[in-house]
Image (cartoon, rainbow, N blue to C red):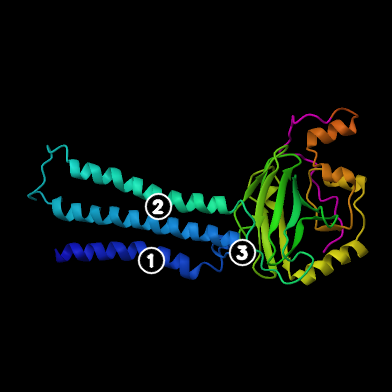
């Protein structure tokens, strides 16, 4: 019996060590385990709860495994009948336990998912966005991200500035290939698709820079499809908007069409944009428009995931 307890303790230590290392030592390196906003924090709690449940199941299985080996592993062990069948008590237990585990995982998951469909509570200081939410339209293009501020009437490329403490509603679209918008420290990923706008609420607790990326393969340069989320104080955000309106160039129709080409570009900023930008046309609709045809189509034929013309052209103003 003493030997069995020693085996069980060893197994539990073995099980606990990786999880303790993950939670204590790696949270500052793994973005998903370093939540910097209410959305990411609620999802982080789900991850921890899932890890606890997984560890509990694994611990029970390992304990039973060691017990069975120690109790019935010897040739002359008593109490084991290989012909024995039909133990109602055990059958009830191994039917109920998985159901309980599923419930314990499903209830908080469903509750969290429904809560994330609403904006988080704003904590911003007094500014133009205080008590409000900020809306940003995001368009994924091979291989870049376009950010449009419909209320401020400005546009950025491959970076986005948000006021810390303010709920931000990202409305997601795709111009060509399906993609996925992800800022690990602020929340989970959401897909971008043509003709199917998606919504994602995010909020940063405090000012800082957060890495965003594409999490869905969309061609040979998708690895360079990254962007920065720059959270600033509410007052600094207002100042930035005014500076953009005063000092940055206008996004012309020609420049916009250039941005829609499959290539990689540096960060760019524009003080305004043409009406065409706000229509969120996909590639097929844009081509139809340019050819004088009807844009009432969502067909995305001949998508080239390995376009050879993805040079480093189209570079604009660095920020």
Please give the residue where the numbered disc 2 appears in the rendered image: 104
**Distance CA(mark 3)–CA(mark 1):** 28 Å
Q: Residue 225: horizontal and vertical position, in percent? A: 71, 51
193 lies above or below 168? above
**Distance CA(mark 2)–CA(mark 3):** 25 Å
Please give the residue where the numbered disc 1 appears in the rendered image: 17
Q: Contact (CB < 8 A) between labels 1 and 2?
A: no
Q: Earlier in the sequence, mark 2 or mark 3?
A: 3
Residue at position x 83%, y 45% from top? Answer: 278
Q: Nearer the viewer, mark 3 or mark 1?
A: 3
Residue at position x 70%, y 70% from top? Answer: 207
**Distance CA(mark 1)–CA(mark 2):** 24 Å
In the picture, measured across the screen, residue 14 lies left or right of residue 276, that is: left
Q: Secondary structure at mark 1?
A: helix
* Screen quadrant of the C terminus: bottom right
Q: Nearer the viewer, mark 1 or mark 2?
A: 2
Number of numbered markers: 3
Q: Is residue 151 magenta?
A: no
User: Label 2: few (<14), some or many (≥20) within 10 Å?
Assistant: some
* Screen quadrant of the N terminus: bottom left
- Give the extent of the magenta segment: 295-319
């Amino acid at each position: 019996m003493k030997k069995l307890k020693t085996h069980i303790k060893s197994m539990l230590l073995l099980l606990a060590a990786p999880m303790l290392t993950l939670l204590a030592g790696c949270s500052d390196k793994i973005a998903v385990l370093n939540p910097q906003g209410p959305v990411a924090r609620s999802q982080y709690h789900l991850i921890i709860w899932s890890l606890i449940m997984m560890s509990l199941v694994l611990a029970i299985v390992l304990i039973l495994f060691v017990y069975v080996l120690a109790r019935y592993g010897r040739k002359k062990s008593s109490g084991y009948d290989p012909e024995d069948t039909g133990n109602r008590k055990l059958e009830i237990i191994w039917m109920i336990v998985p159901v309980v585990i599923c419930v314990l995982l499903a209830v908080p998951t469903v509750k969290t998912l429904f809560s994330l469909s609403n904006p988080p509570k704003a904590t911003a200081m007094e500014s133009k966005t205080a008590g409000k939410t900020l809306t940003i339209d995001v368009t994924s293009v091979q291989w870049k991200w376009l950010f449009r501020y419909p209320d401020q009437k400005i546009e950025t490329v491959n970076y986005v500035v948000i006021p810390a403490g303010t709920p931000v509603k990202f409305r997601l679209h795709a111009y060509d290939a399906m993609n996925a918008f992800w800022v690990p420290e602020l929340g989970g990923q959401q897909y971008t698709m043509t003709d199917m706008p998606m919504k994602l609420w995010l909020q940063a607790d405090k000012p800082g820079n957060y890495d965003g990326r594409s999490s869905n393969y969309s061609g040979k340069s998708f690895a360079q499809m990254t962007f920065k989320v720059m959270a600033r104080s509410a007052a600094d955000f207002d100042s930035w908007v005014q500076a953009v309106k005063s000092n940055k160039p206008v996004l012309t129709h020609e420049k916009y069409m250039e941005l829609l080409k499959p290539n990689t570009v540096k960060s760019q900023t524009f003080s305004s944009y043409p009406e065409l930008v706000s229509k969120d046309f996909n590639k097929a609709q844009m081509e139809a428009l340019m050819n004088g045809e009807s844009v009432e189509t969502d067909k995305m034929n001949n998508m080239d995931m390995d376009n050879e013309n993805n040079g480093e052209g189209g570079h604009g103003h660095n920020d």
